[in-house]
Image (cartoon, rainbow, N blue to C red):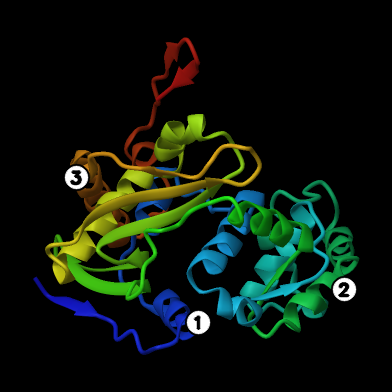
Amino acid sequence: MDTERIPYQMSIIQKTLEYRKSSALNQSKLNWIRTGFKNVKENDGMTYGNILEVKMCYPELFDELFIIGSVPGGRGAEIIRELVRDDVDLDNMSDEQIKYYCTEFYEKSSIDSRHNSLLKLHQYYDDLKGTSGKTLVEKKFVDVVDRKLDKIDHKFITEGAVFQEWIEFEFMGERCKALLDVVNYEWFDIKSTTKSLLDWPKSIDDFGYDVQGFWYDMAVKTVYPDIQFGGYYVVPVLTNEPAKLFKWDLQEAESKVIDLVNLFKWHRDNNIWYSKELHDNEVINLTKTNWGYKF
């Protein structure tokens, strides 16, 4: 198997940016297909998770990665973040750009009204443009994580641990990539949750952590064949529950990953980026269940 371990003398920040530029297949794209091509929208849980990972693994880089400021809520603010991410000029958006980014935002309003609604968030746009690549977060999120860190024991992070381990490998004829939180005597992934830990098994299914876990384990084994799955270290940031390591049989997701890679190949080869089931069937027969209708 053709495997490449990216040299880790590259800085954490540089490594993350270069990883995102790589066109290799990753588990995020597989989970994007699994969820019906739903784009992930940033939420409070993701914000807590990003801060937590940095504070636990490389706290000395916090000021290089984050800047504390005011972050408005709502779909409008989400669109502003998308515009900054895609380097779109807020003041000179074309009608097509406004339609594209505002599909679900003031959709009954005129093009000019939608644009004016975004222009009201210009200060936020300017703040984001001025962060030089840093993530703008509110102080309340940092305070919550700091209070939680005082109560948790992350002893699995020992001297010699490698953070943000970038591995590229081949699977089913595809060039693939993975970026792991912590590789030590075992490999670990750090997650935060705004819910109770009792909901974590459901989160595995909802967010495809079984797919992610199998993918990461496969990547690790190509470089470190003796390193085993240490677990997902899950920190409940809004409850009094202690953080816990969760482990399960990663191999149970192998067939799911194979199916998803084959599905990815079909979508790529046919350049169709919506459900294959919708593409293949003129009539969709629905089945009634106790939880509603399903395909």
**Residue lying at 54% horizontally and 50% vertically, measured from the top left:** 192
**Distance from Cα at disc 1 to Cα at disc 2:** 26 Å
Q: Residue 263: where, in percent of width, then height?
A: 27, 49
Tell me the amino acid under the disc marked 1.
Ile
Tell me the amino acid under the disc marked 3.
Glu
- The residue under label 2 is 123
Camera-nearest label, 1 or 2: 1
Farthest residue, direction left: 1
**Distance from Cα at disc 1 to Cα at disc 3:** 31 Å
- The residue under label 1 is 13
Find numbered disc 1 in the image and state the secondary structure of the residue it sits on. helix
**Residue lying at 68% horizontally and 54% vertically, measured from the top left:** 147
Using the image, determine if residue 235 lies above or below residue 196.
below
Front position in the image: 107 or 15: 15
- The residue under label 3 is 254
**Residue lying at 42% horizontally and 19% vertically, measured from the top left:** 286
